[in-house]
């Protein structure tokens, strides 16, 4: 804004009032004409009822669909069980158990988070029709590599319980596949 310029708020308010008076004296009318829907015509011709739905309507297959309607907030989960490839069942069970136990293991949150990544990668790979053995091996080695310092007591903040848990977890993960 240029120096010394001021907005005339009273002038703007007066202009707004005068404009509104004009609109009140001469309202704007817009004619609206709805076209007949082909479906509406069909329902009337068939003597059927017309349904007005005030919410989502799903026609047909809705497999794996999730829907939240007018509930303010939603927290949804979906369990899609997948078949583990033959020969990987024991390893998948050991990794799933590891992921379930990790919050109560006593190891630091940073190590927990770093283990969850490769563990999830491994589980995602073993449900493939033909898992990539090198990807599975690499993820397993990363998990064991993160657990090893805990198992031998070198990890800061890990107590005796965490050390024993890590040793047990490593032995459970040492399965042929």
Image (cartoon, rainbow, N blue to C red):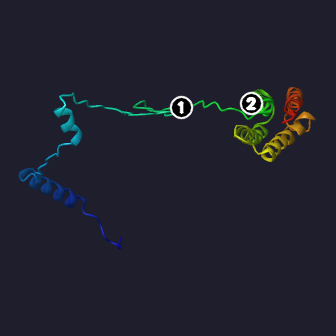
Left or right relative to 89: residue 28: left
> In the rendered structure, which disc, 1 or 2, sits on the residue that comes first in sequence?
1
Left or right relative to 71: residue 86: right
State the residue at coordinates (38%, 34%): 59
> Where's the N terminus, which quadrant?
bottom left
**Label 2 crowd bin: few (<14), some (14–19), many (20+), radius 10 Å:** some
Q: Residue furthest bottom?
A: 2
3D distance between C-alphas at marks 1 and 2: 21 Å
**Whole-percent x and y of residue 19?**
14, 57
State the residue at coordinates (17%, 28%): 47
Residue that carries the numbered disc 2 in the rendered image: 96
**Whole-percent x and y of residue 40?**
21, 37
**Whole-percent x and y of residue 6?**
29, 66
Query: Dot 2: what SS?
Result: helix
Residue that carries the numbered disc 1 in the rendered image: 76
State the residue at coordinates (89%, 38%): 148
> Quadrant of the rendered structure where residue 37 is?
top left
Left or right relative to 33: residue 140: right
Q: Residue furthest left?
A: 25
């Amino acid at each position: 804004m240029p120096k010394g310029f001021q907005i005339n708020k009273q002038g703007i308010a007066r202009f707004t009032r005068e404009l509104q008076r004009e609109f009140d004296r001469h309202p704007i009318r817009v004619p609206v004409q709805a076209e007949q829907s082909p479906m509406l015509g069909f329902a009337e011709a068939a003597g059927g009822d017309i349904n007005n739905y005030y919410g989502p309507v799903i026609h047909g297959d809705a497999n794996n669909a999730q829907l939240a309607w007018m509930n303010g907030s939603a927290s949804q989960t979906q369990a899609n069980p997948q078949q583990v490839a033959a020969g990987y069942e024991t390893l998948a069970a050991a990794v799933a158990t590891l992921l379930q136990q990790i919050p109560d293991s006593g190891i630091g949150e940073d190590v927990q988070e770093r283990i969850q990544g490769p563990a999830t990668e491994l589980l995602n790979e073993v449900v493939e029709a033909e898992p990539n053995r090198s990807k599975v091996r690499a993820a397993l080695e990363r998990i064991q590599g993160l657990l090893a310092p805990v198992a031998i007591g070198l990890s800061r903040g890990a107590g005796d319980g965490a050390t024993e848990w890590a040793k047990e977890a490593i032995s459970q993960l040492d399965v042929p596949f």
